[in-house]
């Protein structure tokens, strides 16, 4: 169930990334005289259109219940047509198109907090530091009872989140129930523009070793990356862990600029070509300005699209050591065409190729779209698509980006699954109802707190063995710290402590010598070729 939940969120991001890769463009207008093929196409289209109009008229007149034109066209006819093309061509109804634009620029107007379902209720998962909900005193674990006097009992968490959004400088009344408080708590919050960065704050995971995670590739990702590395002092970096796990992708130009930050000026980042578009090559425009520290890039099966462009470019140029799982394999270029009625069409127009010329896209022609999204062979590759990196290492196309070294986190056991889904959240909610919402910097759960968690789980019907709880101690400490840091500090501090205690990040740090050796070897080979 945990894996399925993660997949759902990944797919939502992937749909957005699939349409963001080339940004928003206007449809091209052709002034040439129509060819015979075009005339034949137009004649066929007229006949199909007439038949569709007849079918729709019959449905509208005779169907058992009233038919909405928008529902029939936007959710039926157009998506049905696109499903016959490929897994990523997508039509956006007005609401979805607006969400796409918000995701692209990372900005919306609202109160600034993440909400989600817990049982049948919508609860606050994390107020974002510095934004209205956080400043008003809304806390993680608060159950949202009503928004602007409308009960949330029959609403989904998505519907509640939509109600919290609205024009800036307008107010929204939120009533919550907080554990430990005898009365409901009302808040009147003024909406603001909420901007969440796509690059998490970089930090030193060890002396000289920097860590930075890119969540997606939005309008300002490369600028955010530059600012983070500048804040740390890039001249002081001796090694970098670049985390692209669970990154569904985003804007092509941002992927090019991010990769270009680490490559030499003029080096190829990616190219694309399609039936109606000539090949276009994208190169590093600014270059690395002499910063040649070793890099380890973390990827997994949910790293897709623009994340694969970056990891593929750094791998092909032997600039980074890739660690983790084979990436998703999404290398189709979607061009977004704005349409009438605030809708949009994301249409596949080309394929992406890494600098060595290998295809990123995984083959989907021999499986259903369901299998394409939900089943994954980590060893997928096209044996006929064999290329070489700059130093002569063999790499394969047609199956995403294969890592230089594999790492897969162990699957969660039954206790971990229950704790991940709700147990740790519920315990934290209960704990801070009876303790101050404050913890000392650098805090980590001790044995006494684990005993409290153990007793709480038993009292609330969780099923586990003593051996299982003892065996999961390290996992529980890490995930409990992640949860409790949200309550005592904020979500950004929580993400940081979670990365600091990540075994895969530790593995990446230990892999920096391989990245360094790879970089030096590539330099020698390239010099000899010149």
Image (cartoon, grey):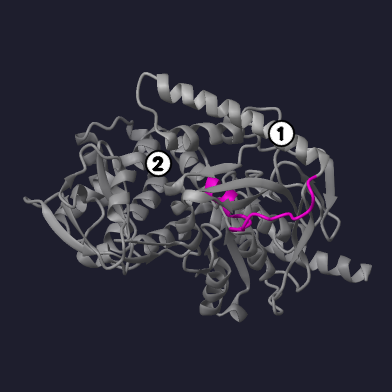
| Image spot of residue 328 (x, y percent) | 62, 43
Closest to the observer: 57 or 350? 57
- How crowded pointer 2 is (Cα within 10 Å; few <14, some 14-19, many 20+) is rated as some
Pointer 2 residue: 472
- The image quarter in which residue 219 lies: bottom right
Please say if the residues under marks 2 and 1 sit with CB atoms less than 8 Å apart. Answer: no
**Image check: 283 left or right of 234?**
right
| Image spot of residue 354 (x, y percent) | 76, 54
- How crowded pointer 1 is (Cα within 10 Å; few <14, some 14-19, many 20+) is rated as few
Relative to 392, does residue 12 appear above or below in the rendering? above
Pointer 1 residue: 43
Tell which circle, 2 or 1, labels the residue nearer the N-terminal end. Answer: 1
Q: Residue at x 26, y 62 (%)?
A: 133
Quarter of the figure that contains the C terminus: bottom right
Can the viewer see residue 303 in this picture? no
Can the viewer see residue 435 in this picture? yes
Disc 1 on helix, strand or loop? helix
Is residue 32 found inside the magenta-colored segment of the image?
yes
Q: Residue at x 65, y 58 (%)?
A: 511
Q: Residue at x 77, y 49 (%)?
A: 276
Q: Can you name the residue that lies furthest to the left here?
A: 182
Indicate which label's residue lies in the foreground, 2 or 1. 1
Relative to 229, does residue 401 appear above or below in the rendering? above
- The image quarter in which residue 29 lies: bottom right
Segment tinted magenta in the rendering = 14-34
Quarter of the figure that contains the N terminus: top left
Relative to 241, does residue 292 appear above or below in the rendering? below
Closest to the observer: 416 or 32? 32
| Image spot of residue 453 (x, y percent) | 26, 44
Disc 2 on helix, strand or loop? loop
- The image quarter in which residue 209 lies: bottom right
Q: Residue at x 30, y 30 (%)?
A: 463
């Amino acid at each position: 169930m945990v894996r399925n939940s993660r997949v759902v969120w990944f797919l939502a991001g992937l749909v957005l990334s699939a349409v963001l890769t080339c940004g928003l463009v206007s449809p091209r207008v052709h002034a040439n005289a129509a060819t015979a093929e075009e005339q034949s196409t137009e004649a066929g289209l007229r006949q199909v259109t007439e038949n569709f109009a007849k079918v729709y008229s019959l449905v509208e007149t005779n169907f058992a219940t009233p038919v909405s034109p928008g529902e029939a066209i936007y959710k039926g006819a157009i998506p049905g047509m696109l499903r016959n093309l490929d897994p990523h061509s997508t039509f956006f109804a007005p609401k979805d198109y607006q969400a796409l634009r918000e995701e692209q620029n990372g900005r919306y107007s609202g109160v600034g907090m993440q909400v989600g379902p817990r049982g049948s209720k919508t609860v606050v998962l994390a107020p974002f530091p510095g934004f209205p909900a956080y400043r008003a005193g809304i806390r993680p674990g608060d159950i949202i009872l009503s928004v602007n006097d409308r009960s949330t009992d029959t609403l989904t968490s998505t519907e509640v989140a939509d109600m919290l959004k609205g024009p800036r400088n307008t107010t929204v009344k939120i009533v919550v129930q907080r554990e430990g408080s005898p009365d409901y708590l009302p808040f009147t919050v003024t909406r603001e523009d909420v901007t969440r960065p796509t690059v998490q704050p970089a930090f030193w995971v060890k002396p000289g070793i920097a860590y930075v995670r890119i969540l997606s590739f939005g309008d300002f990702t490369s600028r955010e990356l530059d600012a983070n590395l500048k804040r740390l002092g890039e001249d002081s970096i001796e090694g970098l862990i670049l985390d692209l796990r669970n990154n569904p992708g985003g804007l092509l130009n941002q992927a090019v600029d991010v990769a270009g930050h680490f490559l030499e000026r003029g080096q190829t980042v990616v190219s694309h070509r399609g039936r109606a578009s000539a090949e276009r090559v994208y190169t590093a425009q600014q270059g690395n300005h002499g910063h040649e520290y070793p890099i380890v890039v973390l990827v997994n099966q949910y790293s897709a699209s623009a994340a694969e462009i970056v990891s593929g470019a750094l791998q092909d140029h032997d600039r980074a050591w890739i660690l983790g799982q084979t990436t998703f394999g999404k290398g189709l270029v979607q061009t977004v065409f704005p349409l009438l009625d605030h809708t949009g069409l994301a249409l596949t127009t080309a394929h992406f190729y890494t600098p060595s010329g290998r295809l990123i896209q995984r083959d989907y022609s021999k499986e259903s779209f369901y299998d394409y999204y939900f089943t994954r062979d980590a060893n997928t590759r096209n044996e006929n698509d064999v290329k070489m990196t700059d130093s002569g290492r063999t790499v394969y196309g047609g199956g995403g980006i294969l890592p230089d070294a594999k790492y897969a986190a162990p699957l969660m056991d039954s206790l971990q699954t229950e704790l991940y889904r709700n147990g740790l959240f519920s315990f934290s909610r209960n704990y801070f109802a009876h303790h101050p919402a404050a913890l000392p910097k650098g805090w980590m759960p001790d044995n006494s707190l684990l005993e409290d968690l153990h007793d709480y789980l038993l009292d609330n019907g969780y099923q586990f063995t003593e051996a299982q709880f003892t065996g999961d101690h390290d996992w529980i400490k890490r995930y409990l710290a992640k949860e409790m840091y949200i309550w005592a500090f904020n979500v950004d501090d929580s993400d940081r402590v979670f990365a600091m205690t990540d075994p895969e990040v530790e593995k990446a740090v230990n892999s920096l010598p391989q990245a360094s050796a790879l970089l030096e070897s590539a330099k020698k080979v390239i010099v000899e070729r010149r």
